[in-house]
Amino acid sequence: MSVHRRNFRLKRKLWRERVSNRLTRYLNKYYWRITVAIKKEKAKAKKQKGTPKFGILREMTTPELSKMESDLRKELFDLRSKIKLASQPNVRLIRETKKTIARILTILKLRVAEVQQ
């Protein structure tokens, strides 16, 4: 191999390393900004997605609550099957869905008790 060819390869290697170093420095510089922004978006989505509170459920009508209960039961069935197939890694959703169903049933039982009195 000629000297010229060897020098060219060394220069090309050094240039690639320089470019990759610049890129990694740039990415490291803005990495924390990107991660903070992503965490904030996830927190917003989590707040919006959360289970409805007891007071909000209490304001709903009885037919709305019964429809919501049936929808949640279907969703719970789907979640269980997804977890069995390992396509849904988030087991926490099952717990939240169960709790929401329990809240709805509690409200419905309270309403039945009020009517009987």
Image (cartoon, grey):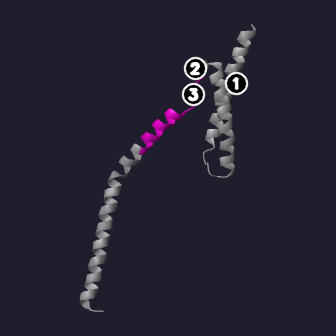
Name which residue type carries label 3. Answer: Pro
Magenta stretch: dominant secondary structure: helix
Classed neighbour count for the residue bearing mark 1: other residues with Cα under 10 Å, few (<14), some (14–19), many (≥20): some
Q: Relative to residue 82, is residue 21 drawn left or right?
A: left
Residue at position x 65%, y 27% in the image: 67
The residue tagged with tag 2: helix, strand or loop?
helix
Distance between mark 3 and mark 1 Cα atoms: 14 Å
**Residue 37 placement (x, y as % from top left):** 39, 43
The residue tagged with tag 1: helix, strand or loop?
helix
5 to 89, vertically: above or below: below
112 to 22, vertically: above or below: above
> Which tag, 3 or 1, sits closer to the chain's start?
3
Where does label 2 land, which residue?
55
Where does label 3 land, which residue?
52
Residue 5: in sight, yes or no?
yes
Q: Which numbered tag is attached to residue 105?
A: 1
Residue at position x 69%, y 41% in the image: 77
- Residue 49 belongs to the span the image colors magenta: yes
Residue 98: in sight, yes or no?
no
Q: Quadrant of the C terminus?
A: top right
Residue at position x 29%, y 82% in the image: 9
Q: Quadrant of the N terminus?
A: bottom left
Image quadrant in which you'd find residue 56: top right
- Residue 109 belongs to the span the image colors magenta: no
> Which tag, 2 or 1, sits closer to the chain's start?
2
Name which residue type carries label 1. Answer: Leu
Image quadrant in which you'd find residue 15: bottom left
What segment carries the magenta color?
Answer: 38-54
**Residue 55 placement (x, y as % from top left):** 58, 20
